[in-house]
């Protein structure tokens, strides 16, 4: 989890490579020989580059290094915006890190590029047994597991109870008709027509925001972005059309103003409802102070009462590079970090790490133990959603497909395309992207 700006706790998807990365990011990592006095040194490359995240990962690494003489671990981190490019550039230069922490969306691309090593059978079994199906699916390609899921994010509906009460809305919406009605009732404008309160927060901030909101609604409608065989998009469907039509109505009816940055507007009371991932709770508390008590979270609304719940799941994994000269040692460190139980509550180190920074893992048993009675109740809906969330597609062209989807969603929201045009353009562009050889 990165923290690129005040009030925002999520990733951007620009993949431009700064010149400093070419020199610093590709410096050859030191690897020992394993002989007495010269331990093996495994390099771990992540985006936990600053603040609480950097310390949260460094603490267990320090613990490992203090208790293991033959194998040591060294952290290397870059900003999330540089992470995928760093993986690819270092690999091409023969300087890939032993252990990498990719966004699960990139798993298919990294597997196709020969960067990620499949998990050995005993580790794959531990992963399948210990994590939610969504987390395992996100860390797998063609049913083959490629790493230990670390951070797991599900999407739900945040709402400001004070704004709902002020508009006479009795409670958070459970269905799309209730969502639309509440969005229009909570929207407020000044006498010049400027939006003071956005009823439902659609935002063009970045790929994660724009696409995450839409895919969570798509999953709730029973749809998927990519077809089961991974060879095309499935968004041009009745479910996809219903989502695009819902968003179009919210925008054209004035209940949503996509140009508003929801990460700033919601904490300041200028957005009544927004769909986002569970990581946001950790940012909202310090930003909102006492006002955070008015924030509630419920599952993503479904089209009709009685529909089965569903939502989007995203995440990260820790895996071993195909180029690592010490894969057995690397997997053993990952097992120690992600599967070994420790402490009074008997949870894994990675689960404790994620909860310490306001996030979750895909280990539901760990999360229940760590959140306990005193945990933030707003995290519970995200934990419950692990049981029914749909993992983000991670086919080889997934990152580019996501960017294309974002562009067409924004064209819909800004009136440049109709619902039908946005669906057809998305299908044509994404089908071409995921079908091309990588």
Image: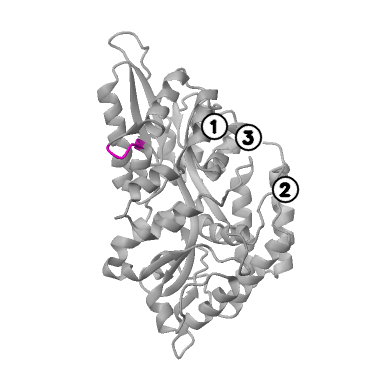
**Residue nearer the viewer, 126 or 238:** 126
- Helix, strand or loop at label 3? It is loop
Q: Magenta residues, as a range?
A: 344-349
Residue beneath the point at 41% across and 64% down: 263
Residue beneath the point at 46% across and 55% down: 382
Residue beneath the point at 40% across and 67% down: 296
For mark 1, does the 10 Å Cα neighbourhood hold few (<14), some (14 to 19), or many (20 or more) residues?
many
**Is 319 displayed left or right of 232 in the figure?**
left
Q: Earlier in the sequence, mark 3 or mark 2?
A: 3
> Pointer 3: what residue?
143
The x and y percentages for residue 297 are: 43, 64
> Pointer 2: what residue?
232
Q: Does residue 404 sit above or below 134 in this rendering?
A: below
Q: Earlier in the sequence, mark 1 or mark 2?
A: 1
Foreground label between 3 and 1: 3
Question: Whole-Å distance between the Cαs marked 3 and 2?
Answer: 18 Å
Question: Whole-Å distance between the Cαs marked 1 and 2?
Answer: 23 Å
> Pointer 1: what residue?
146
**Is residue 82 on the magenta stretch?**
no
Residue 374's quadrant in the figure?
A: bottom left
Q: Does residue 258 sit above or below 219 in this rendering?
A: below
The x and y percentages for residue 115 are: 55, 29
**Residue nearer the viewer, 46 or 212:** 212
**Is residue 346 on the magenta stretch?**
yes
The x and y percentages for residue 403 are: 59, 53
Q: Residue furthest bottom?
A: 191
- Helix, strand or loop at label 1? It is loop
Q: Which mark is residue 3?
A: none
Residue 160's quadrant in the figure?
A: bottom left
């Amino acid at each position: 989890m990165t923290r690129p700006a005040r009030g925002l706790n999520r990733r951007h998807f620009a993949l431009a490579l700064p010149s400093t990365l070419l020199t610093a990011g590709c410096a050859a990592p030191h690897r020992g020989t394993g002989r007495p006095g010269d331990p093996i040194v495994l390099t771990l490359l992540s985006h936990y580059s600053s603040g609480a995240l950097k310390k949260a990962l460094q603490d267990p690494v320090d613990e490992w290094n203090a208790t293991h003489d033959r194998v040591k671990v060294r952290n290397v981190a870059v900003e999330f915006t540089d992470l995928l490019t760093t993986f690819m550039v270092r690999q091409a230069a023969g300087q890939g890190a032993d252990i990498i922490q990719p966004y699960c969306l990139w798993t298919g691309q990294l597997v196709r590029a020969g960067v990620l090593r499949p998990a050995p059978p005993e580790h794959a079994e531990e992963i399948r047994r210990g994590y939610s199906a969504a987390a395992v699916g996100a860390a797998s390609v063609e049913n083959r597991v490629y790493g230990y899921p670390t951070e797991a994010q599900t999407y739900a509906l945040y709402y400001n109870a004070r704004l709902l009460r002020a508009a006479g809305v009795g409670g958070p919406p459970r269905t799309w008709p209730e969502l639309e009605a509440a969005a229009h009732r909570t929207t407020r404008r000044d006498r010049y027509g400027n939006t003071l309160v956005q009823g439902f927060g659609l935002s063009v901030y970045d790929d994660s925001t724009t696409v995450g909101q839409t895919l969570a609604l798509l999953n709730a409608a029973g749809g998927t972005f990519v077809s089961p065989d991974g060879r095309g998009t499935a968004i041009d469907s009745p479910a996809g059309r219903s989502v695009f039509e819902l968003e179009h109505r919210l925008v054209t009816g004035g209940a949503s103003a996509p140009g508003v940055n929801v990460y700033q507007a919601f904490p300041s009371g200028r957005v009544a409802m927004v769909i986002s991932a569970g990581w946001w709770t950790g940012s909202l508390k310090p930003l909102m102070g006492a006002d955070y008590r008015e924030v509630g979270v419920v599952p993503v609304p479904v089209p009709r009462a009685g529909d089965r719940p569903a939502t989007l799941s995203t995440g990260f994994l820790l895996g071993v590079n195909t180029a690592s000269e010490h894969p057995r040692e690397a997997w053993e460190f990952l097992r120690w970090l992600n599967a070994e139980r420790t402490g009074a509550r008997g949870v894994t180190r990675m689960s404790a790490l994620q909860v310490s920074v306001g996030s979750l893992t895909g280990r539901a048993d760990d999360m229940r133990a760590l959140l306990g009675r005193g945990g933030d109740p707003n995290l519970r809906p995200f934990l419950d959603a692990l049981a029914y969330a749909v993992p983000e597609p991670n086919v080889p062209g997934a990152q580019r497909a996501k960017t294309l989807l974002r562009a067409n969603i924004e064209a819909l929201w800004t009136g440049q395309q109709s619902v039908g045009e946005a669906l057809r353009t998305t299908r044509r562009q994404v089908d071409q992207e995921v079908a091309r050889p990588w």
